[in-house]
Amino acid sequence: MGFQFQTEEQVDLTLPEDSIHRAQLDELKTREVQFTNRNTGQPDSFTKLEWWWKITSSTLGDQYIGRKVKGECDAKLTSHPGNKFRVWAETLLGRQIPVGMVIDTDDLVGLQADISIGHRPDRKDASRVWEFVDEVLPISGGFELSDEPPF
């Protein structure tokens, strides 16, 4: 007799696109990305910074608490207005980061913000989507996301 498996109920806990959740930065790590330079045909690489967030509160229900979701950016901290590293770090720290200031990632881990979720279709299977942190936002309001508004 072969292996037997019984179908079980499983709730879809995909984080809805554009939903906002309170989250704590759980981990920051670098990842080297290898590619072939189209201009030179030579192997090349760049470093990404992976931001791993753990959801601590959600208006969608407690079933999302503890879920981890990743955001990525270039591992370069610059003054460019679109530099995600600087924008996300400034949001977490609640202050601007001037040119020349050094940021230690240990100072960011453990801090909280509101995160918005984006979806990216899988390149090989269009029926699958990948969740990612699209934006890091300042914590809104003076109440937990799971609480009723104070009015």
Image (cartoon, helix red, strand yellow):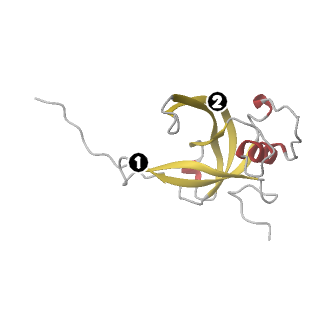
Q: Residue at x 88, y 34 (%)?
A: 101
- Is residue 62 toward the left or the right of residue 23 in the image? left
Total tally of numbered discs in the picture: 2
**In this view, the mark in front (2 or 1):** 1
Look at label 1 and name its amino acid. Answer: Arg
For this rendering, which residue is in front, 125 or 57? Answer: 125
Look at label 2 and name its amino acid. Answer: Lys
Quadrant of residue 74 within the rendered picture:
top right
Checking the image for residue 123, the label placed there is 1
Q: Residue at x 42, y 48 (%)?
A: 122
Give the distance between the C-alpha atoms of the residues marked 2 and 1, in whole angstroms: 24 Å
Q: Secondary structure at mark 1?
A: loop
Quadrant of residue 5 within the rendered picture:
top left
Q: Position of residue 75 (x, y in %)?
A: 68, 35
Dot 2: few (<14), some (14–19), or many (≥20) neighbours within 10 Å?
few
Of the 4 image quadrants, the one containing the N terminus is: top left
For this rendering, which residue is in front, 120 or 116? Answer: 120
Q: Position of residue 43 (x, y in %)?
A: 50, 28
The image shows residue 21, relative to residue 108, as above or below, that is below
For this rendering, which residue is in front, 45 or 47? Answer: 45
Checking the image for residue 29, the label placed there is 2
